[in-house]
C-alpha cells in the first residue's frame, strides 16, 4: 500500500476542494482492499451517488469516504442532519472510511473503517442552521462524533503512517459483525454498555464497577426504570457475542 498521493492527476485543476477530492478518492481506488471480504480492490461508483462512494465487486459492500487535512480529531463534518438520521434509523448506511492526510506531504496519515452497525443517532451532532445571508439559508448540517464510537468500531487500516495487515483488518471487521443489530434501541444500548466497559481501565472488572455508570445511563435512557437489570442483560449479550467472559461472582474479563 503506497501512502503517497499521485499529484500528477490534478495538474488541470485549480479548486482546492476538487483537488483534495480527486487525490483522496483516487488513492482509495488504487490502494484499498475490501475490509469485509478481503478482495484486493474496491471500485469507485461511476456516477455521483447520494449514499456511497465505493463498492466491492465481490461482496457488494458499499463505502463512503470522509477525508480531512490534518488529524481527524473527535468529530468530522458530514452532510444534512435529517438525511443522516434517516439513513441510520432506516439501516441505509454504508460503511465509512475516515481519512486524515497531509496536504503539504501529499500522503495518507490515518485511515479508519467504521462499520455501519456502529452508527446510532447519539453520535450524530446537529449543527446550527446556516444564516439567512448564506446561499442555502436555514440548511442544517451535522458532525459525526468519532470519539463516541466504541473502539471496537474504529478499525485502523493506517495509523500514523503505519499500515496494518489486511487479514488482521478483515478479522477485526468480522468479529465486529457479531455486534450488528438492526433494532436501533438495542443497538444504542449495546454501544453504550460497550463504551462503559471500555472506560474501565483493568482487563478484569466487576458488576459493581459497571453499576457506577447507572446515573450516566439513566440520563441517556430516561424511559428505562431498571438500569442495573439492563446493564446485566447487555453484559450477557456481550458475553454471548464473545467480547467479555463471565468468571462468576459478578466478575468479568474483557476478551477482545
Image (tube, rainbow, N blue to C red):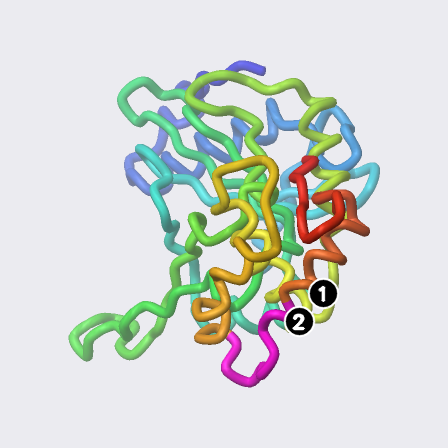
Rendered position, 165 above or below 75: above
Q: Residue at x 76, y 39 (%)?
A: 174
Residue 92's disc is: none
Asked if the residue under mark 1 is in contact with the one under mark 2, i.e. CB atoms within 8 Å, the reply is yes
Q: Nearer the viewer, residue 170 or 55?
A: 170
Q: Position of residue 95 (x, y in %)?
A: 63, 48
Q: State the SS at label 2.
A: helix
Q: Which residue is mark 1?
A: 233
Q: State the SS at label 1.
A: helix
Quadrant occupied by the C terminus: top right
- Does residue 107 appear left or right of residue 70 in this picture? right
Quadrant occupied by the N terminus: top right
Q: Residue at x 42, y 55 (%)?
A: 145
Rendered position, 206 above or below 9: below
Q: Residue at x 67, y 45 (%)?
A: 252
When asked about the image quadrant of residue 242, the answer is top right
Q: Which residue is mark 2?
A: 229
Q: Main secondary structure of the magenta part?
A: loop
Farthest front residue in view:
249
Mark 1, Cα crowd under 10 Å, few <14 / some 14-19 / many 20+, is: some
Q: Which residues are magenta?
A: 221-230
Q: Position of residue 37 (x, y in %)?
A: 79, 34
Amino acid at each position: 500500500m503506497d501512502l503517497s498521493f499521485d499529484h500528477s492527476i490534478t495538474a488541470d485543476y485549480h479548486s482546492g476542494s476538487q483537488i483534495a477530492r480527486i487525490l483522496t478518492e483516487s488513492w482509495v481506488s488504487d490502494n484499498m482492499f475490501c475490509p469485509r471480504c478481503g478482495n484486493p480492490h474496491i471500485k469507485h461508483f461511476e456516477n455521483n451517488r447520494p449514499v456511497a462512494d465505493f463498492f466491492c465487486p465481490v461482496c457488494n459492500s458499499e463505502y463512503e469516504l470522509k477525508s480531512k487535512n490534518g488529524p481527524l480529531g473527535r468529530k468530522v463534518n458530514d452532510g444534512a442532519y435529517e438525511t443522516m438520521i434517516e439513513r441510520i434509523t432506516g439501516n441505509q448506511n454504508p460503511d465509512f472510511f475516515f481519512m486524515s492526510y497531509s496536504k503539504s506531504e501529499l500522503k495518507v496519515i490515518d485511515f479508519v473503517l467504521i462499520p455501519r452497525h456502529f452508527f446510532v443517532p447519539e453520535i450524530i451532532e446537529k449543527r446550527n442552521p446556516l444564516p439567512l445571508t448564506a446561499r442555502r439559508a436555514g440548511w442544517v448540517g451535522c458532525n459525526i462524533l468519532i470519539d463516541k464510537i466504541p473502539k471496537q468500531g474504529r478499525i485502523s487500516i493506517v495509523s500514523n503512517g503505519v499500515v496494518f495487515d489486511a487479514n488482521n483488518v478483515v478479522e477485526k471487521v468480522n468479529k465486529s459483525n457479531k455486534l450488528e443489530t438492526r433494532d436501533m434501541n438495542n443497538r444504542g444500548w449495546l454501544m453504550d454498555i460497550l463504551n462503559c466497559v471500555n472506560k474501565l481501565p483493568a482487563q478484569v472488572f466487576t458488576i459493581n464497577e459497571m453499576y457506577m455508570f447507572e446515573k450516566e445511563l439513566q440520563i441517556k435512557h430516561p424511559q428505562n426504570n431498571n438500569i442495573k437489570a439492563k446493564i446485566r442483560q447487555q453484559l450477557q449479550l456481550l458475553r454471548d457475542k464473545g467480547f467479555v467472559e463471565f468468571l462468576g461472582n459478578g466478575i468479568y474479563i474483557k476478551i477482545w
